[in-house]
């Protein structure tokens, strides 16, 4: 922590709650982590809880879902 006026310096000690959100952000930044796995690591009983709190960190989940539907439709047309 610092008492200087620099914008990029930590001016207060982060709370445990702040650190929990940082942990979640790091988890979501790893493309190998699924929303369900992150939800369980955070101790949420419902995936909806994780989605509600961290939904803005999951745009790749939407992209993956769209790709999966497109692939399924292609497979259905080829059959």
Image (spheres, rainbow, N blue to C red):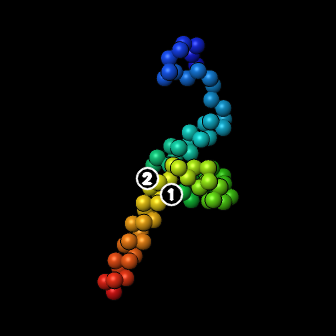
Image: 10 above or below 68? above
Which quadrant is the C terminus positioned in?
Answer: bottom left
Looking at this view, name the residue that lies furthest to the bottom: 79
CB under 8 Å between discs 1 and 2: no
**How much space separates mark 1 and mark 2, taking CA atoms?**
8 Å
Element type at mark 2? loop
Relative to 69, does residue 24 appear above or below in the rendering? above
Q: Residue furthest left?
A: 78
Please state the horizontal and vertical placement of residue 28, each as a whole percent of the image.
Answer: 50, 49
Task: Identify which residue, 22 or 7, lies in the foreground.
Answer: 7
Q: Residue 38 location, x and y as percent?
A: 56, 53
Residue count near mark 2 (Cα–Cα under 10 Å), binned few <14, some 14–19, many ≥20: few
Residue 3's tag is none
> What residue is pinned by disc 2?
31
Q: In the image, residue 67 lies at what x, y percent?
A: 39, 66
Q: Residue 58's x, y, as percent? A: 50, 53
Badge 1 crowding class, 10 Å Cα cut-off, few under 14, some 14 to 19, many 20 or more, is some
Which residue is found at the position 62% from the left and 36% from the top?
18
What quarter of the picture does the N terminus occupy?
A: top right
41 with respect to 60 (left or right): right
Q: Residue at x 35, y 79 (%)?
A: 75
User: Which numbered circle lies on residue 34?
Assistant: 1
Report whether residue 57 is seen.
yes
Reply above or below: 57 against 16. Answer: below
Element under disc 1: loop
Q: Residue 50: which quarter of the image? A: bottom right
- Position of residue 39 relative to residue 14, above or below, is below
User: In the current view of this chain or complex, which residue is farthest to the right?
Assistant: 45
The residue at the point 41 percent across, 69 percent down is: 68
Residue in view at x 61 percent, y 36 percent: 19
Instruction: Judge whether residue 33 can be spotted in this image.
Output: no
């Amino acid at each position: 922590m610092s008492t200087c006026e620099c914008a990029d310096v930590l001016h207060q000690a982060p709370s445990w709650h702040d650190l929990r959100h940082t942990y979640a952000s790091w988890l979501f930044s790893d493309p190998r982590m699924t929303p369900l796995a992150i939800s369980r690591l955070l101790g949420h009983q419902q995936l909806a809880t994780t989605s509600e709190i961290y939904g803005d960190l999951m745009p790749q989940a939407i992209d993956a879902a769209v790709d999966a539907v497109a692939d399924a439709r292609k497979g259905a047309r080829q059959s």
